[in-house]
Amino acid sequence: MVEEWDWTTVEFGDAHAGTAGVLLADGTEPGPVYVDAVSGPEAYPTTHWTAYDGQHGSPRAHALRAACACGWRGAAEYPLDWRAVGDGPPAEHHVDLSGPLADWNAHLSVVRETVVPLPEPLAGLLLDLSDELGDVVADAPLAALRAVGILRRIIAEAADEAAEAVHDSGASTESVAAALGTTPSEAFGLLLRFHTF
């Protein structure tokens, strides 16, 4: 299925990507709808709120709410006024998504309270590195690729040692996931990817 997440963070990646989720008039969250591909006879499944316009057999969204890839759903509902949205594409230009976005950001604040904090010097170094790499990509892309290769080797060595230490600690997958700000399956996958036990 094609997931069109509206909001992402470098901090949490796909584990906590957010979007404006759909609610129908009966309060249920619909399954994906199939949208015709621009070129070709196939249709692809989507859960993006703009596809729930009541056309071509899709249900019509009654309200929006914040939704996160981790499964969290916001409690606040934001009714959709389809008369204000109109028929002109794209619909997202006519709808204020600031409510769902604020709710998703509040959810991320709660997630941040459960994650293990980074030591302050390391957090600053990562921010500086991100800025510096962005500049190098623009000015010297080959140098940026070389830097990424070096970083991958550094990361691989540190990740192997860290994953082994976490495994040896006996921490549950759930507690590791909470500390990393990700899902249990992602945490388990990270441990397996970074270290063979």
Image (cartoon, rainbow, N blue to C red):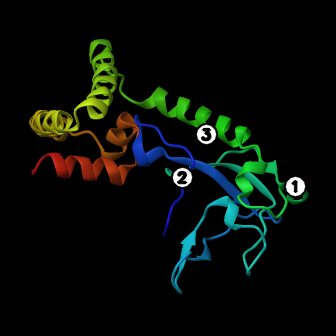
Residue named by callout 3:
104
Location of mark 1 (residue): 81
* Picture coordinates of residue 89, whole percent (x, y): 73, 61
Q: Position of residue 187 (x, y in %)?
A: 31, 47
Q: Nearer the viewer, residue 88 or 157?
A: 88
Query: Mark 2 or mark 3, which is nearer the start of the sequence?
Result: 2
Please state which amino acid type lies under the numbered disc 1: Asp
Q: What whole-number distance in Å separates the C-alpha atoms at marks 3 and 2?
A: 12 Å
Quarter of the figure with residue 125: top left
- What is the three-letter code of the residue carrying label 2? Trp
Near-viewer residue (61 or 91) = 91
Residue pictured at 35% horizontal, 36% vertical: 180
- In the picture of the structure, the residue carrying the numbered disc 2 is 5
Residue drawn at 78 percent across, 50 percent down: 94
Q: Nearer the viewer, mark 3 or mark 2?
A: 2
**Mark 1 / mark 2, whichever is N-terminal:** 2
Q: Could you tell me how far apart the alpha carbons at marks 3 and 1 are, in whole angstroms? A: 22 Å
**In screen coordinates, is 62 left or right of 93?**
right
